[in-house]
Image: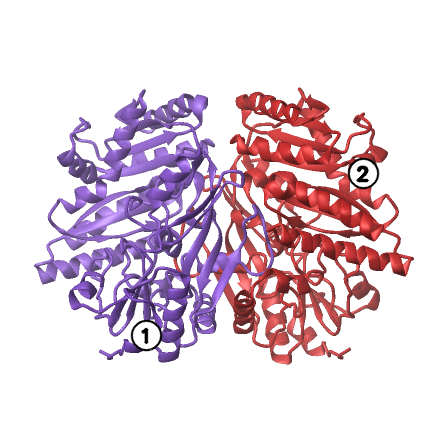
Chain colours: A red, B purple
Amino acid sequence: MSITDVRGLRELLPEGRVFDDPDVLAAHSRDRATFCPAGTPAALVRARDTGDVAAVLRWAHAHRVPVVPQGARSGLSGAANALDGCVLLSLEKMDAILDIDVDEQLAVVQPGVVNGVLAAAVAEKGLFYPPDPGSRSISTIGGNVSTNAGGMCCVKYGVTGDFVRGLEVVLADGRVMRTGRRTAKGVAGYDLTRLMVGAEGTLGVVTEVTVALRPASAQPLTAVAFFPRVADSARTVSGYLAEGHRPSVLEFMDASSVAAVQQIVDLGFPDGMAAMLLVQSDRGDEAPADLAAFEKVAHARGAAEVVVSDSAAEGEMLMQARRLVGDAHEKLGKALLIDDVCVPRRHLVDLVDGMERIAEENRVQVLCSGHAGDGNMHPVVAFDDSDAEETERAQRAFDAIMQLGLDLGGTITGEHGVGQLKRAWLGRELDEAGLWASRAIKDALDPHHILNPTRVLP
Amino acid sequence: MSITDVRGLRELLPEGRVFDDPDVLAAHSRDRATFCPAGTPAALVRARDTGDVAAVLRWAHAHRVPVVPQGARSGLSGAANALDGCVLLSLEKMDAILDIDVDEQLAVVQPGVVNGVLAAAVAEKGLFYPPDPGSRSISTIGGNVSTNAGGMCCVKYGVTGDFVRGLEVVLADGRVMRTGRRTAKGVAGYDLTRLMVGAEGTLGVVTEVTVALRPASAQPLTAVAFFPRVADSARTVSGYLAEGHRPSVLEFMDASSVAAVQQIVDLGFPDGMAAMLLVQSDRGDEAPADLAAFEKVAHARGAAEVVVSDSAAEGEMLMQARRLVGDAHEKLGKALLIDDVCVPRRHLVDLVDGMERIAEENRVQVLCSGHAGDGNMHPVVAFDDSDAEETERAQRAFDAIMQLGLDLGGTITGEHGVGQLKRAWLGRELDEAGLWASRAIKDALDPHHILNPTRVLP
C-alpha cells in the first residue's frame, strides 16, 4: 500500500472538504458489489462545487494520486470501491437541481441529485425523466450517467445515455470541459458526451448534467402472466414485441424470485408457476388494447393465468412486487452474486435454460429476474459464503453465466457496468482493436492514470 | 501539391479497385458543399469489402498518405472533398443489406446502402428505419452515420446515432474493430460506436452498420398552417410542443421558400403569408386529435389559415412540397450557401428575426426552411457568385448567421456536420478543454493524421 500525504490537498480546498478519519473512510470504501476487493483510501473529499473537483484533480494529476469518484455508492460493479492510497471524491453534496426548463423540455442538475428526486421534481411540472434504475430512490444522476444506467422503462424509452444532452466534466488534469448542447440536435465535433457516459469515472469527473425530458405519459395499465414453463414466458416476450407492440415495461421474474417476494408481501400469486411476466402500457386510451393483445399472445404460448389490472393502484402494487426482488433476494440470508447479461431476445430461452444447467452443475441456487423486453437479465447466484468451496462454485457459476451470455451473442453487462467486477471479462467481449482503441483513449485523456485506475479496462 | 505514388497500392488490391484517370478523379473530387476548396487526388479506390479498406489504410498508414472516405458525396460540408495527393476511398460499392432481423428489430448493412433503399426494404417487413435526411433518396447509411444525419422525423424519433447499435470500423492502421452490440442494451466499455458516429471519417472508416428498427408507425395525418408573421409561426412551434404533443414531423418554410416551391408545383398556398408550418402525427386513432390541437394553438397565435388534410395522398403531396425546397432554391439560379444552425426552440423567433437583419445588412437574400420542432433551421444565403463583392457579403452573412446561432445558445451544425466548411467555427463552439480532448483522441487513434486530415478539428 502506498502512503499518500494529503496535507497539500487540504491546503488547496476550503474547510470541511477533506476527511481522513479511519471510520469515515471505512464507511465510504465500498459500493454494493459483492466479492470485489476494496483498498484503504488516504482521504475522502466531499466536493461542494466544480472548483473543488478541479482542485482535487489538479493536485492528484501533479502528485500521481489515484482518484475514485463516488456518488451514492449504490453501484454493483465495484467501480466506486476505494483503491489503496486513493482520494475518494464524493459528488454527493453537489445535489442541486439547477434548472428545469419546461419549454425546452430539459433539466440541468448537479451529479449528486438522486434519480427519484429529479423524476419527482420534473413530474410536478408535467414532465417525465424516464431512466428508472432499480436503485432510483437512492442512486444519483452522476452515477447513472457514469454507468449508463438502465431500468424498467428502457424497453420503450431507452437508457440514461439517450437522455444526456450535455455535460460539464473535469478532465484528469483539472481542466473543466463542457460537452454537448442544450438544443434538441447537434453534431459539432466528436461526441464527447457519449464518451463520458458509461466511462465509470475513468475519463473524467462529471460535475453537471443536462438531461432531456419528455412530456408526462399517461398513467400506465398493468398485466401479469404466469407460466408453468419458463420457455413459454420467453416466447411470449419475443412474440409480443414481434407484433409491433411497444410496452413501457416488460419484466420477468422466475419462480424463486416470485416466491421470495411473496415472503415479503403476499400478492396471491398462483402456486406451481415457473415464471411471471409483468407488462405495462402507458398509451392512454390504447393501453387496454395493448394489454388485451398481450393476454392473447401469452395464452397462445402457454400462460396458465393472465391478470389485467383495472386500477392504477393495483398496477402500482404489482410494480412494487417487481421492485422488491432485490430486497427479497437479500432476505434469503445467502451471499449473492448479481449478474447483468443482455442477449438478443430470441435467446432468452437459451439463457434461462443455460442458467438452470449452470446452477445444477455447480450446485448453487440461481435466481433470475430482469428486463425481458430488452433481453437484459439479472441472474443472481445465491450461496453460503462461509463455505469456501461453495463460494468457489458460486464464482464459477457467475462466470459461466457471463460466458453463456457472450456465446449467445450478448454482452457481459446491460446496465450495471464493468467496474472492477467484470474487468477481465471486458477483454473477452471486446476485440483486440477495440481494446487497443479504448486504451489509447484512456492514455490520451488521463496520461498518468489517476482517474479510477484499474477499473473498466483490463 | 505532394506527389503520391499509388503503384504499391495497386499491387495490394484486386483488379478493378484503383482508378487514376483524371476525369474519373475530377468527377469524384467534391461533395455538395459550395465554396469548399477541393484538392487533386492521386487515386480513387472503389472498395468491395472490408479487406480492401483495411489494405488501403495499412498502406496509407505506412506511407503517410491522406485518405478521404466517400459515400454518395451528397454531404454539405466538404468532408468528402479531395485533398491534394490523397486516396479517395469510396464505399459506394459496398451496398449490401446483410440482414434484416424482424424478431430483434435490427438490420445489418454495408455503408454504401442508400438510406431510402434500406427504409423501403425494412418497410416491406413491417418495420421502420426513422432517420430520414432530405438526401435520403441518394445518401448512404455510411455517410449518414459519419455525419450523424438528421431529417424530418427526428423531432419524434431521434437522429441517425440514436439508431446505431454497432459498427465495424477499420482503424487508421488497417486493423478491423467491431463496436457495440446486437442486443437492445449494453454498457461494456467506452462507447466507441458513438465516438465514430459523426466523426466524418476522421477516426476510422465504417465498413458495416447495425441499426435498430422500430415497428411500422401508422400512416400519418398532415396539417399545414400559414402565418402573416414569422414570429407567430415560431411561437406556435413552442406552444404546441409545450402542451406535450409529440408530432412525427414539425417543419417550417418561409415565404420565399414557399414561393420557390410554388414555382415547381402550384399547391394553391395562400398569398401574402410570411411563413408556413407543416405538422404530422402518426399516432393512428389519436392523430386527428393531435392535429386539432395544433390547429387550435396555431389559430390562437395568429395563423391566418390552417388546413388539416383528410387524405394520406394529400398529406404526402404536402410533404413532397417540403422535400422540394432544396431543388426549388437551386432553381432560383443563384449561388447558395446552405447553413444548418440549431437553437433552443424558444429562440427560433430571435433566429428568424436576426436572419432578416443579417440579410438586410449584407444586401443578400436569405431563405429559410427547417426542422422547426428541433430548432434546427437551414438558412440559405442566395447570391450572385459572379460578383466578387457580393460573394464576400454572402460569406459574411453566412458567418453572421452561425455567430447568431451560437449567441442564442445553439450550435453551428444540427445535422450536416463540420467537414471543411465549419472547421474554424468548431473552434468557437467548443471550449479549450473540449478542443484539447478532441485533438488528443484524434492523435491517439490516428497518429499520422491520414484519416480525412484537416477536416472537423481546427
The amino acid marked with disc number 2 is: Ser
Question: Where is mark 2, residue-wise?
Answer: A256
Q: Residue B181 placed where, x, y %?
A: 54, 52
For image coordinates 44% across by 67% down, the residue present is: B171
Q: Quadrant of the N terminus of chain A?
A: bottom right
Question: Where is mark 1, residue-wise?
Answer: B11
Q: Nearer the viewer, mark 2 or mark 1?
A: 1
For image coordinates 45% across by 39% down, the residue present is: A103
Distance between the Cα atoms at labels 2 and 1? Answer: 63 Å
The foreground one among A325 and A305 is A305
Residue B6 lies in quadrant: bottom left
Badge 2 density bin: few <14, some 14–19, many ≥20, Cα 10 Å: many
The amino acid marked with disc number 1 is: Glu
Q: Secondary structure at mark 2?
A: helix
Q: Residue B45 placed where, x, y %?
A: 29, 65
Q: Residue A117 placed where, x, y %?
A: 65, 43
